[in-house]
Image (tube, rainbow, N blue to C red):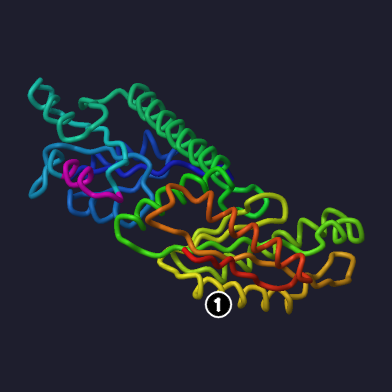
Amino acid sequence: MENRYTILAVDDTKSNIEILLTHLGKQYNIIPALTGQKALDIAQKKQIDLILLDIVMPELDGYRVCTLLKENEFTRTIPVIFITAQTGEDAIEKAYDAGGIDYVTKPFRPRELLARIKRELTLQQLIKDLEASKEELRILATTDPMTKLYNRRSFANISSNLLGQSKRESQDMSVLMIDIDKFKDINDVYGHDVGDTVIITLAENLRNMSRKGDIVCRYGGEEFVLLLPNTRVGGACTLGEKIRQQIEEFIVKIESGGQLQFTVSIGATEVDVQAEKNLEPALKRADVALYQAKKGGRNQLVAFLDDR
């Protein structure tokens, strides 16, 4: 069954509500409210797509109800169409000032009201679709599609901002560069699908083991980078060694029924926060340390240490 839009109809006269139910009930889910406070309560608790709002009501009139709706973060985007017997220009202007998007006078013509409701709901759906598309594009632009981690481009932007913050606050910062050992052999023996599974497995472990505030990036191919704010190289090595041990013990199940284990090599270094203008020097040092870990037999962590 096709999902129907839900309209909140607010009017203190029951007969007016019944008229709205008669003309709109076949196309929309109608929720009635006889007071402004009841309307506010319903809008806060239920998913409302549009509100038809009378102006003249006791205690809270339609203007006040609309103003309160627009002040509430949860309800402010719900479109409000005023439907009232008041036809003066001052009343119409006040309705728009309160946040209404349209104004229909009583007695309304059913086809006209339906057309206005349809127009507004269509517009709202277009806006939602546009916002969803913008979010999808943002995700595509900033994340690696396979692992859902930050991609290299977004990592560069984020790391630049974090380095600037660390400079201002005189905080430490370290980097871990992580590479899957003998990844080509995994692809050659088990196939690229299994190779992808290994990459995703490592990404999930890195995400789960990193702290809030750490930045995890798929830097390229089978290589990953962790940026660790407020961390000296000793703390980075401690985390890196935990990661290495966990990956070494992790069993990857293969769809064919088999399983495999893999290891990683890790290079660690500390960022010279005050002297370095960007992260490139630290990444190069981490890469040198990673190369030494590979050359030394793989499945190990090497820290780049100098006299800085």
Q: Of residues 45 and 184, which is closer to you in this image?
A: 184
Q: Quadrant of the N terminus?
A: top right
- Determine whether, in the image, residue 220 is placed left or right of residue 198: left
Q: Secondary structure at mark 1?
A: helix
Q: Residue at x 20, y 27 (%)?
A: 106
- Determine whether, in the image, residue 59 is placed left or right of residue 19: left
Q: Compared with residue 136, is residue 114 higher up or lower down, i.e. above or below?
A: above
Q: Of residues 113 and 227, which is closer to you in this image?
A: 227
Q: Residue at x 23, y 38 (%)?
A: 53
Q: Compared with residue 283, is residue 258 higher up or lower down, i.e. above or below?
A: below
Q: Look at mark 1 in the image and give the residue it sits on.
A: 238
Crowding at dot 1, Cα within 10 Å, few <14 / some 14-19 / many 20+, comes out as: few
Q: Does the segment drawn in magenta span residue 70?
A: yes
Q: Over which residues does the magenta segment extend?
A: 65-74
Residue that sits furthest to the front in the current view: 307
Q: Compared with residue 216, is residue 4 higher up or lower down, i.e. above or below?
A: above
Amino acid type of disc 1? Answer: Thr
Q: Compared with residue 125, is residue 252 higher up or lower down, i.e. above or below?
A: below
